[in-house]
Amino acid sequence: MKATFFKILSPIFFWNIVAAQTSNPNIIDAHFTDELIKLDGRLNEPVWQEALRINNFTQREPKMNSPATELTEVAIVYTNNTIYIGFWGHDREPDKLVAKEMKRDFDFDLDDNFEVIIDTYNDDRNGFLFVINPNGARADVQVLNNGESENIFWNGVWNAKTTITSQGWFAEIEIPFSTLKFRTDIDRQMWGINFERNIRRKREQVLWQGWSRDSELELINRAGTLAGLDSIRNKNFVEVKPYTIGGREFGSGTKTGVLNAGGDINYLVTPTVRINLTLNTDFAQVEADRQQINLTRFPLFFPERREFFLEGQDYFDMGFGSTIIPFYSRRIGLSKARQTVPIIAGARILGKTGNTTLGAMSIQTAREDSVPSTNYSIFSWRQDILKQSSVGILSSNAYTNGRLHSTTGAYAQYSTSVLFNDKNLNIGAAFTQNINSDNFDKAANAHRIYLSYPNDKVEFDMAWQRSSRAFNPEVGFLSRSNFEEYYAELEFKPRPKNILRWIRQFSLKPLDLNYFIFDDSGYLQSFKYEIRPLGFETQSGEFFEFNYQRIAEGIREPFDITNTISIDVGDYWYSRYEIQAATFRGRNWSISANLNWGSFYTGKSTSNEYEVLLRTSRYIKVGINYEKNWVNLPKGTFQTDLIGNRVEYALNPNLFGALFMQWNSLDENALLNFRLQWIPIIGADFFFIVNQNYNTSSNRWKLERTTIVGKFIWRFVV
C-alpha cells in the first residue's frame, strides 16, 4: 500500500518541481570574511572550506530534469568591497575538456564554461552575466528586460583565475561591488542569482535553477536567491579614464602624424545611477566593419562597434525590430560614407531608480569638411509595470545650423513566463513621430504591433508595422521606407524520443511570411514566403535545414544592381531553394555552408557562402569566409566575390589580438586590420592597430593607405 501511495504521489510531486523549475536549496548564503583571498583559482583559503557550497545542478540538455553527470559546486564569499565566487567543476575526464579560447569576450558557445548571472536590483528583469572557461578567459554581458535584450559589449571591471587538475577544473571569480549596481536604501541585500555549466564534449548544459527548455539562464525571474550580504560598504566613486593616442598615416606620397588625448569621467550619483562625461572621444581601436555585397535596392545596415555607444545601447531601444530603428548611434561621429567625424565632448546618464530606468545622452560633434557641427541628444524613460512588463518613451534629436529634428515616441510591452505551465509570451506596441522645427507633418510617423511566443517546441511570431512615406528618422535607420508590413512565422521543434535518437531536435516551418506594400499606394513592395519541410540539429551538434522560398518584388523605379545592369519597373515573382548546414563549432575544426539558388527577377542566380573555423590550440583560431554570387540576367551576367580571413591569437587572457583581411570584387578593394590588446591591470588597456587599404582594380594589390596607431587607456578610481 505504501509503495502504491508513493507511485501515485511521485508523479504529482515531480510535475510540481518541473513546473516550477526550482531545486532546493534555491538560496545560497554568502560568507563574509576579512581575510585576504589570493586570486589563483586554487580555492585553498580556509574561508572556502567554511562557506556553504551548493551542488544541486540539473540538466537542461541533453536529458532535461536529470542530475548533472559531473559534480558541480559553487560557494560565495565576500569582503566589504568585493564578492568572490568559487567554482568546483569536477570532471572524471579532465583531459577531454574543450578549452580553445583565451581572449577577453571570448566566444563562450564553443568551450566548456561556467556562467553566473546576478540580479542586483532583485527586480527579475536586469542582471550582469559573467562567463569563464578553463583557460581563465573572461566574457561579460549586461542582460535587460528578463533576457529580451542583451548588451554583449558591456565590459565590467572584474577578474578570474582557473586551475586544471586530475579532478577537473576550478575557478575563483573576483567582482568589486563598484562594478555592480544595487540599492542601498534597504537594510538587507537579497539578490537574484543563477549558475550554468556547459560540458561541451557531451553537449551537456546544467543549471542551478530554471532548467526548463522554455527557459534559459538569461530569464532572471527563474533565478535563485543570494542572501547574507549584510556587510557591504556603499561607496560612491569617481572613475577617471584618460587616453593618449599617437601614430602616423601614410598615403599617396603623404605622411600625417596622429597625436591626440582625451578621456572619460564616470561618477556614481547613486549606486544605481551613473553619469559619464567624455572629452575628445576617439575610436581608433575599433575593428573595421565587415564588408557586405548588396544586390537589393535597400540600404545596408552596419552594426555599431564603438564601445562608448554600445554600453548604453539597450537603454535606447523602442522594440521596433530591425526594419525601423528610431535611434541609430552610428549617425553620431560617422558620416554617410562611414568616415570619422570628430566628437568634441558629450555627457550621458544611465541607471535605474526603483522601477524607473533612465537614459540620457548629449553629444556635440565638430565640423568636418561638408558635415556641419551637430548636437545629438537622446532621452529614454522606461517604467516597470506588473511582474515583467514595461512602458516607456524615447526621443532622439539632432540640432544643426539652427534646425531641430526630433523622432519621439512611446512603447509598451506585456511579458509573462508563466503562461500555460511556464511558457513565454510577449505582446508589444510602439509609435514614433517626426517633429521638425522648420516643418511639422503629422503624417511623418511609424508604428508597430507584435506578438511573440518564443518557446522550445513551438515558436510563433507575428507583427504589423508601418512607416509612412514622410517618416524619416534623421538620427535613426530605415532598411526600407514608405511601407506597411505583415509578418507571421510558425516553427515546430519536436524532439524524437524512441526513433532517430541521433537527432536532438527538428525544425519544421510551415509558415514564414513577410508581406510589404507601399504605404502611399497599397501596391506590392516585397513578398517572401518560406517553408522549411526539413531541419534538424543532431546530438553531436551538426545542423541542417532545407527551405523553399517564394519571393516577389514590386519595382516602381528602376535601380542599378551593378554599374552596367539595371532592374526595370514591374512586378517580379520567382522561387528559390536554400540549404544550410554546419558541423559542431566546438571541435578543433568546423565548416558551415549556405547554398541559395533559383530564379532572380527575370533571370537566375546562385549564392554560396562558406565558413571554415580552425581552433588548433588555445593560442590560435583561424576563420575563413567566402561568399560568391553568380547572376544571369537578360541584360547581362556578372559574378561577385567576398573573401574574409580572420586570425585570432592570445598569449594569455590579458594579451590577445586579431588579424582581419577582407576583399570585395565589386569595389575591387581589400582591407587589412591588425589589432593587439594588452590589459596590464584590470581596467586599463593598451591597443596597437594597423589598418591598410589596397586597390586591386588592375589585377594587382596597390597599397593606397596605411595607418599605424597606439592607444593607451588608464583607469583611476577616487
Image: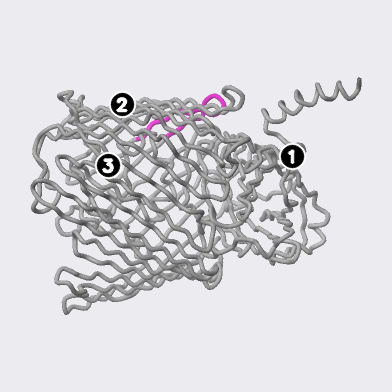
In the image, what residue occupies the spot 64% across and 61% down? 97
The answer to whether marks 3 and 2 mark residues whose Cβ atoms lie closer than 8 Å is no
Q: CA distance from mark 2 to mark 1?
A: 45 Å
Q: Residues within 10 Å of mark 2 (few under 14, many from 20)?
A: some
Q: Amino acid at mark 1?
A: Ile
Residue type pointed to by label 2: Tyr
For badge 3, the amino acid type reads Phe
Q: Percent position (x, y) of residue 630?
A: 22, 53
Q: Residue 194 location, x and y as percent? A: 65, 43
x, y percent for residue 591? 44, 57
CB within 8 Å, label 3 to label 1: no
- Residue that numbered label 3 is attached to: 477
Q: Quadrant of the C terminus?
A: bottom right
Instruction: Name, please, the residue furthest toward the right.
Output: 1
Instruction: Place residue 165 in its image quadrant.
Output: bottom right
Residue nearest the viewer, comparing 681 with 559: 559
Secondary structure of the residue carrying numbered label 2: strand
Task: State which region is magenta.
Answer: 381-394
Give the main secondary structure, helix, strand or loop, of the magenta stretch.
strand
Q: Which residue is mark 2?
A: 486
